[in-house]
Each structure stands twice: as C-alpha cells, then as structure tokens.
Amino acid sequence: MRNGKAVRFFLAENRAPAPDAGKKRADMDLFREQVLHLPVCRKKKIPVRMWETAAFIHPVSWVLQMLFLLCGIYWAKWYGGKTAVTGIAAIVPLFTAVGGYELSKAVFYQMWELEKSCRYDTRSVAEMKLLLFGMCDLAALTVFSLLVYGESGDFLQVCFLVLMPFNVSSGVYLFLLEQFPARNGNVLLIGAGGMMSAVQILFRQDWERLTAALETAGTGLVLAASLLFLAGMIVRYCREREREDRILWNLD
Amino acid sequence: MELRLDRVTKKYGNKLAVDRLSTVMGHGVYGLLGANGAGKTTLMRMVCDIQTPTEGAILLNGVPVRDMGEEYRDLLGYLPQNFGYYPDFTPWRFMLYIAALKGLSKGAAKEKSMELLKEVGLAEVRNKKIKTFSGGMKQRLGIAQAMLNDPEILILDEPTAGLDPKERVRFRNLISSMAQERLVLLSTHIVSDVEYIAKKILVMKAGQIIHEGSTREILRAVEGKVWECVVPAKQADAMAQQFNVGNLKYVEDGKVLLRVIREGKPAESAVQVEPVLEDVYLYYFEG
C-alpha cells in the first residue's frame, strides 16, 4: 500500500519526456504496418450477426409482419368473439410466409454462390434468418395466443388455431422452398399461405367436429407432432442448403 | 503460398465434369482456357469450396481446404459466372452486405467498400440501383466485392463475359494490377483475356488439363502448324470445310485470305506464320 502511494507520488512528480518527431513518426509507421497485417475477417458474436442480418432484410418484410400483427390486434379489438378468433386463425399462416420469402431470397436472386464463398456462408445466413424470424414469430404468436384466449377463454382454440397452424404452415413453407427453389417462390408461398388461411377458416366454421376429432387424438400429441414436423423441416432445409447435387452441370 | 489440386474429380451422376485434374499454383495470374462445358465452372466452384470433389483433394500449403473451412474462405475472393444481387440493392449496400458476410467490422466494411468502389470507378453511382447498371458496371462491382477481404486467392469465372472491348481491356489491366501478391485464377473462353496477363495458361478439355504452361510454351504446341494462304473463294469454302480455319478474310478479285491450323501445308501457296494463342485454342477445340 505504502509502495503504491510512493509510486503514485513519483509519477505525479515526474512527467514523461515528449517523444521527438522522428520517433513518433517511426512508431506511427510501425503501427500502420501492424494494422495492415491484422486479419480482415473476424469471428463475430451472434447478436452482432443477427443485427447485421436484420439490417439487410427488406423493410417491406418488416412492415408486412407488423401489418399482419396489427391486423390481428385490430380484428380482436373491433369484432371480438368468434369473428376475431377466425380472423386471427386466418392471419397466422400468412404471417409466417413473410419469413419464408426472406429465407429463400439467396436462391431466387442467384446470390447463393457468392454467399457460399464467404466466411458466413449461405447456411449461416439461413440459420441467422431462421433465428431472427423465429424470435419475431414467437413474439407475434404470444400476442395472437393471448388474443384468442382472451376472446374464447379456450386453451384448445389457442392450440389448434394458433400454435399448431403456425408449426404446420412454417414447416410447409420450408418444405416448399426446399423442393421448389425457383424465382417464383414468393408466388408459391403466397398461394400456399392463402390456401392454409382458407383451411383455417373452414376449421373454425366446423370447430365442434374438429375439436372432437383432435381431442380423440390427444391435444398434446397433435401439438407435439406439429412441432416435430416443423423441427424436421428446419433441419431438412438447413441440410439442403449444403447439398450440391442440385447444381446442374451446364451440359445437362 | 501453394494451392495444389491433386487428382480432383467431380461426377454429376454418370457425367464426368472434372477428371483426375492435378496442378500446382502460386502467386500470379493463371488463365483457365476451355470451351463451354469443359468443366471450368465446376473446377472453380471446387477451388472455392462451394462444391466437394467426388475424388481427390485441394490443398492449400499442404492442408485440405475442406478441413480449413472458414479459415480458407477468409482467404478467398470469388466472382461467379452468374452473380446475382437483390433487386433493392445499390452498389454501396451490396458491398456492405458482402463485407458483413466476409466478417469485416462495420468501420472496415465502409472504408474498404468506398476504396474499392473508387478503384473500379463506381463510387459516383454507389447509390443507384444495381439493376440499372450495364453488364460492364455489374462485372466491375463483382470484382470489387471479391476484393473486399483483400484475398490471397482470387477466383474469377468468366469475368469478361458481356463486356465490350474497351471494358475488357480495362478489366484485364485491373486484374493484372491486383495480381502482384496473390493467386488469380481466371476462367475464360476468350483467348485475349489471358494472353497478355497470365503467368500460366491451363487448357481444359473434357474435364482434364490437356496442356499447361506460359503463353510462349503453349504456343510451341502449334509452332509450324499455322499457315496463311490466298485462294479463290470457291476453294476457300472447300478448305474451310476440310481444315481447321482460324481467319477468313475476303481480299481483292474474289480471293480469300485463310489462316489454317494443321500439320501439313494446306495449299501450294500457303506460308507458315507466327502462331498466336487463338490458334492454340482452335487447335485444341477444333470442331
């Protein structure tokens, strides 16, 4: 402690001599040379990667997702009851389609080859987008679930009109994107989303019969199956990003 | 630095795109010359670790690039034959996007992007949509993105496709200036792209390197086999059918000047001339 005090006193009393211009210049040159030899590419933390990925997602995608979420809230607040639940049930598959489109842009626009040659390749980009949209979807799902529960007071409706359709529609989109990685993929997604929304409306119309059938199968089991389906499709999709035999040789 | 391709083979089902190809490359420009379907793009993709060889290995300083993963991709700059871009992208945004994927920090990305856009003459139009650009401007943007991480290995697949002659010369000089301290592998079927700047030319046919060496060495393959003769137009038509004809130029009095590549004298009046790389190309890719 006494030593520390003595050192502080010594340092306060003695000033370091100013470096002469030549030495200063030589040090700066050495520093510049060292900086040039630093690796250009560096490992980035996941939050940084997520932030960067989010910054390059088209603003329209964010606006669309927000629009669907607001539609659900508006529906619930304006109509209430059975109509609100039906509306939200129809919105869920469309909401998830937005993420699907963003996910497959690299293939639609021939960016995959360039992305694949980078440190963070196509697979890494797809995983980051899945994580990002997964988080957004989770937040929206919570809102939709609360709205449906608030309107119907029935947890079964939350399961079968929000959670299960979310899992199934997301899984279907991933399957379609992997099977038909074409430029018109967004049209395919909108088409599939529209169909699934229609199915949701029909389900809601025939709610009594549907719940009877689903309860027989077991609510937990049906939900778990839909979750497994989604997980399987995510794994399949990520693996497919790595597959090469889709790349056709120019003579084929 | 040594990039070694050791009996690299790639099969697509029954089709053999690259057949037990072996070569060694160091610093400098390497021109990969071959007709469409020779396997150039497949080879390039394998060198970029985008595709995996069915057999054989690609080694950087003795280490398989497959095992190096992102460490290898950090050293790589790639311009694919058909490089795409998102429709809403401007060159500036495109560069920042690729920089993010290459792992550059935000500050370094901005600095390097601006520096490269200036170098390729696109700084002024950096905020315009890429979709409004000409083919040449897009290619220049392509080379700029490939240089973002200051790569040691630069792979350019048909970089001059769709460029006019002036842009091609500019592009060639740009590549030449960038090749001082790195390996540049450039695939093309346009002979003049590599004739003047390549340290070594690899002639590829049916998935194999059929000839490799400097321009001078490659030219030796056709030394004494290039002829020029002036013949009547009717005879020229017959000769064009029969021989490997490089140039055919109508001169005066219904006569034609022919440049023929073949072992023996094609006509009585034929004289031997100095070969150029285009003759080599025609010699190997005849028919």
Image (tube, grey):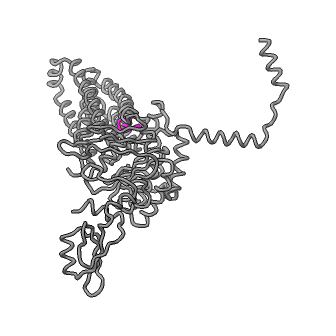
The main secondary structure of the magenta stretch is helix
Which of the 4 image quarters holds residue A72?
top left
Number of numbered callouts drawn: 0
Question: B213 or A158: nearer the eye?
Answer: B213
Question: B49 or B140: nearer the eye?
Answer: B49
Name the spot of residue B264 as percent of width and height, x first.
24, 69
Residue drawn at point x = 52 percent, y = 59 percent: B124
> Considering only vertical position in the picture, is A149 above or below B97?
above
The image quadrant where one finds the N terminus of chain A is top right
Name the spot of residue A154 as percent of width and height, x first.
27, 21
The part of the chain drawn in magenta is A120-125
Is A153 colored magenta in this rendering? no
Which of the 4 image quarters holds residue A179?
top left
Name the spot of residue A236 as percent of width and height, x first.
26, 31
Residue drawn at point x = 24 percent, y = 51 percent: B206
Name the spot of residue A151 as percent of width and height, x first.
30, 26
> Considering only vertical position in the picture, is A188 above or below B244?
above
Residue B93 visible = no
Q: As drawn, which residue projects farthest toward the right?
A: A13
* A67 displayed left or right of A33: left
Q: As drawn, which residue projects farthest toward the bottom?
A: B253
Residue drawn at point x = 68 percent, y = 41 percent: A28
* A16 displayed left or right of B83: right
Which of the 4 image quarters holds residue A98?
top left
* A28 displayed left or right of B31: right
Residue A204 visible = yes
Question: B121 or B248: nearer the eye?
Answer: B248
> Considering only vertical position in the picture, is A218 above or below A183?
above
